Image (tube, grey):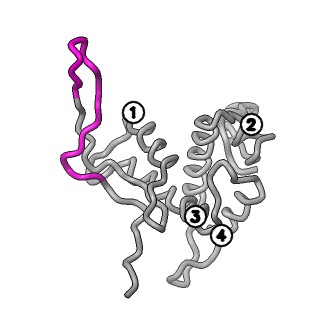
Amino acid sequence: MSRAPVRVLTSVSTDFELPLVVRPDGGVDMKSAESLPIMRYPDGRICYFANMFVLELYSQGYSLINRGGTLRAYMSLLAHIIKYAHNNQLTFPQLTNNRFQLFLRSLDGFLKTGKKRASNQQIRIICQSLDFLQYVGNVIDRPNFVSKTGDIRAFRVNDLDDGANEDRKSVV
């Protein structure tokens, strides 16, 4: 008997809350976080880096309206790199520029439907993946993990200064 495939992106329960602040009397004020997306690997294990990234974006005020809002949309884009890392038995800190390039090429392949992914969709997946990997680099204390000279050589071109800003990233 085969098991049903694990959904990489699910949501917490509708009554889920996160701590907001600890009061001087030691009490904790909670904030509703219903529909917060939870990321898993295809084998069902929790993807800790992705869930820490979800919490980081949530703390920055990204929306959870309508079953997950902006956070759910962003995390659905990350499902691709999570599956790629899992299928290739990689952790995110193990990603190199060559492995990331293979991930990029996999996005250009044919889907199960026989169609190709639209270029704009590929760009959204790549940009969100780079944002996520930059976050991973900061968590593992490798702030140049995604940079012009980092493990993953990418940067975002700033239209205003012709790419002089190395803090932003885009695929090189």
* Vertical relation: 72 (above or below) 102: above
Residue tagged 1: 59
Residue tagged 3: 86
Look at label 1 and name its amino acid: Ser
* Vertical relation: 160 (above or below) 86: above
Q: Which residues are magenta?
A: 12-29
Q: Earlier in the sequence, mark 3 or mark 2?
A: 3
Circle 1: element type? helix
Percent across and percent down for residue 30 are 23, 31
State the residue at coordinates (69%, 67%): 105
Q: Are marks 3 and 2 in contact (CB under 8 Å)?
A: no
Q: Which circle marks residue 163 in the picture? A: 2
Q: Nearer the viewer, residue 46 or 115?
A: 46
Look at label 4 and name its amino acid: Ser
Percent across and percent down for residue 93 are 66, 48
Q: Earlier in the sequence, mark 4 or mark 3?
A: 3
Circle 2: element type? loop
Look at label 3 and name its amino acid: His
Between tags 2 and 4, which lies in front? Answer: 4
* Vertical relation: 135 (above or below) 20: below
Q: Are marks 4 and 3 in contact (CB under 8 Å)?
A: no
Q: CA distance from mark 2 to mark 4?
A: 27 Å
Q: Which circle marks residue 106 in the picture? A: 4
Q: Are marks 2 and 4 in contact (CB under 8 Å)?
A: no
Residue farthest to the left? 15
Circle 3: element type? helix
Q: Earlier in the sequence, mark 1 or mark 4?
A: 1
Q: Residues within 10 Å of mark 2 (few under 14, many from 20)?
A: some
Q: CA distance from mark 1 to mark 3?
A: 27 Å
State the residue at coordinates (28%, 50%): 35
